Image (cartoon, rainbow, N blue to C red):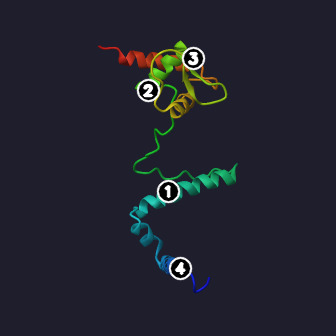
Amino acid sequence: MTDDEPNARSLEETVREIADELRRSIERASRAEPEELVRAIGVDPEQVREWVGTAGGWLRMQFDGAREAEPARPSRQDVFRDAEPHPLDVPTQEQGIALAALDSGRWALEPGTQALSVRGGGPGPHDALGLVRELRERDWIDADGVVTVVGRHALGRWLAAAEPG
């Protein structure tokens, strides 16, 4: 850098200041107790212990293979209990409409893609990629976008839930 570039010097100084502050922050963090760091970012230390215990149990099971790992202590609230989609779910409004449209042939999955196309009148889906992923995860459609037997049963559950009375 030359003296002819006044802005370049101030940029260099700014970068040095940022690097110095980052170094000081890392030094402070390395001297702090882990529990203090966890509290500083707003997380309950007991919750972190549970996460670490669960992760450690999973890692032991992965690496030990044949040896049984001690099961992790169940948490007070299992937030991932229902995280996986289930084929016996009742479809949402959008999923039910998609299953009906795919089953009737009004919508189709473009070959080799996850794009839904409209083959007849009417509007298409708002989130076609997400919708196709959701239908496939529940085994309601196959790779070609054809409604499966499980998908037809899901469509039946959706229609029954929509019936008045």
Comes first in the chain, label 2 or label 1: 1
User: Within 10 Å of the Cα at label 1, are there few (<14), some (14-19), or many (20+) other Cα atoms?
Assistant: some
Kindly identify which residue carries mark 2.
Answer: 94
The amino acid type, in three-letter code, at marker 1 is Trp
Contact, CB < 8 Å: mark 2 with mark 1?
no
Kindly identify which residue carries mark 1.
Answer: 51
The amino acid type, in three-letter code, at marker 4 is Arg
The amino acid type, in three-letter code, at marker 2 is Glu
SS for dot 4: helix
Comes first in the chain, label 4 or label 3: 4
**Which one is closest to the eye, mark 4 or mark 3?**
4
Kindly identify which residue carries mark 3.
Answer: 149
Comes first in the chain, label 2 or label 3: 2
Kindly identify which residue carries mark 4.
Answer: 23
Q: Which residue appears at 50% of the width and 17% of the height?
A: 101
CA gap, disc 1 and disc 4: 29 Å
SS for dot 2: helix
The amino acid type, in three-letter code, at marker 3 is Val
Q: Between residue 132 and residue 136, name the one nearer to us.
A: 132
SS for dot 1: helix
Q: Is residue 73 visible?
A: yes
